Amino acid sequence: MAFQTMEWIGATATLRLLDQRFLPEVVQYRDLATPEAVAGAIRDMTVRGAPAIGVSAAFGIAQAALLAEAAGRPLIPALEAADGVLRASRPTAVNLFWALDRMAGLWRAGAGAAQLLAEAQVMEREDIAVNEAIAAHALAILPQEVTFFHHCNTGALAAVGVGTALGIIRRAHEAGRKVFAYLDETRPRLQGAKLSSFELMEYGVPHAIVVDGASAHIMRRRRVDMAVVGCDRVAANGDTANKIGTYNLALAAQDNGVPFYVACPSSTIDLATPDGDGIEIEEREADEVLRIGGQRVAPEGAPAFNPAFDVTPNRLIAGLITEFGIVRPPFDVNLRALLAGRDGRVVSCGK
Ligand SMILES: CSC[C@H]1O[C@H](OP(=O)(O)O)[C@H](O)[C@@H]1O
């Protein structure tokens, strides 16, 4: 059963999103007609994953312009309102702000709806190329037989293309490597158990779901060649924000001599944030911790604290796998060198 994370429906100027909140049991879509609805879908995690969030927001901006033009209303106030509501949807994934800044650069310069829609579609295509380039750079360092440890969901459900870290795992399998992946479940939203396994089942990639607390034991007792995760924001020194539990996994990997890699589209690199202490960590509703599948698992009235991300210090990271190549320490120097003069241009994935 094929699935598509997002699709622009030109006839109705709606953004069709796969509603990831009900996977894997139910594959259902939502057609969103306004930037406010797109912002709500980002906030409630209908769509999630740093790259997918950014592209969705770009389409939300295009929608604002289309609606204003159709109603004969001035563009700038409508776009400023849409930009504001989208920026407020989630705080940690820098791709959201990177995408909105890129769109704002156009509409503040007078771009109309057609140009804004075209730019959102360019970003959609770029993500596909970026994902393939990340996988290609990773493949160059992978052995013929490779066992991965993966956290959260970073595949096609988190992006427009094949995804980042899970895209590496998928493409390695499809390239003929003998691949096995341990997927931790990733409490509380279970992106690993629900979404990454859904994807790897679809692609036929051998894997096993494990509880979050099993990572150190597995890396100590069983073969794991590489831990690979996604990212939501990489600070200028290489400290990386990703789904809560990533830092724990990185510590377990270090303790067991397992190299820890971050699949990192350049749109996720935030040179304006010097280090991980400057990254805002989203705190979500306590109910996400207190309930599983709507069933309360904690005592009535019990409190919970639900940070949705954590920051992995750069000292635990072997490399950042970007579309331009693998960045190694010292990250502060090498990240700036990687981006110098590129102004975010995406590498082509052409033959
Ligand atoms: C392609 S990286 C996606 C990144 O986003 C996830 O967070 P969420 O599911 O809350 O959007 C997680 O941090 C992944 O690594």
Image: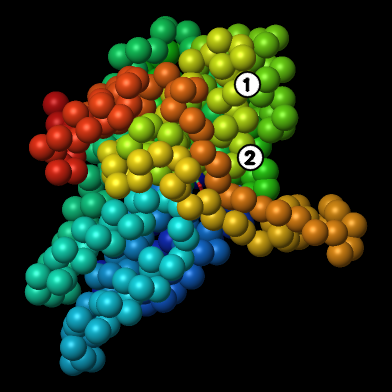
Mark 1: amino acid: Ala
Q: How many marks?
A: 2
Could you tell me if residue 230 is visible in this image?
Answer: yes
Q: How is the image coloured?
A: rainbow
Sequence-first disc among 2 and 1: 2
Could you tell me if residue 179 is visible in this image?
Answer: no
The answer to whether mark 1 is within 8 Å of ligand 1 is no
Q: Which residue is depicted at the point 40% across and 39% down?
A: 275
Mark 2: amino acid: Thr
Give the vertical position of 295 relative to 149 (above or below): below
Q: Which residue is mark 1?
A: 252
Q: Residues within 10 Å of mark 2 (few under 14, many from 20)?
A: many
Q: Which residue is depicted at the point 19% across and 43% down?
A: 344
Q: Which residue is mark 2?
A: 186
x, y percentage for residue 276? Answer: 45, 40
Q: Which residue is depicted at the point 67% across and 43% down?
A: 187
x, y percentage for residue 118? Answer: 16, 62
Front residue of 187 and 195: 187
Q: Quadrant of residue 9?
A: bottom left
x, y percentage for residue 164? Answer: 39, 35
| Residue at the far right in the pictured view | 299
Give the vertical position of 298 relative to 264 (above or below): below
Q: Which residue is depicted at the point 35% across and 12% down?
A: 141
x, y percentage for residue 1? Answer: 50, 44
Q: Residues within 10 Å of mark 1 (few under 14, many from 20)?
A: many
Q: Nearer the viewer, mark 2 or mark 1?
A: 1
Please identify the quadrant where the C terminus is shown: top left
Q: Quadrant of residue 13?
A: bottom left
Front residue of 295 and 235: 235
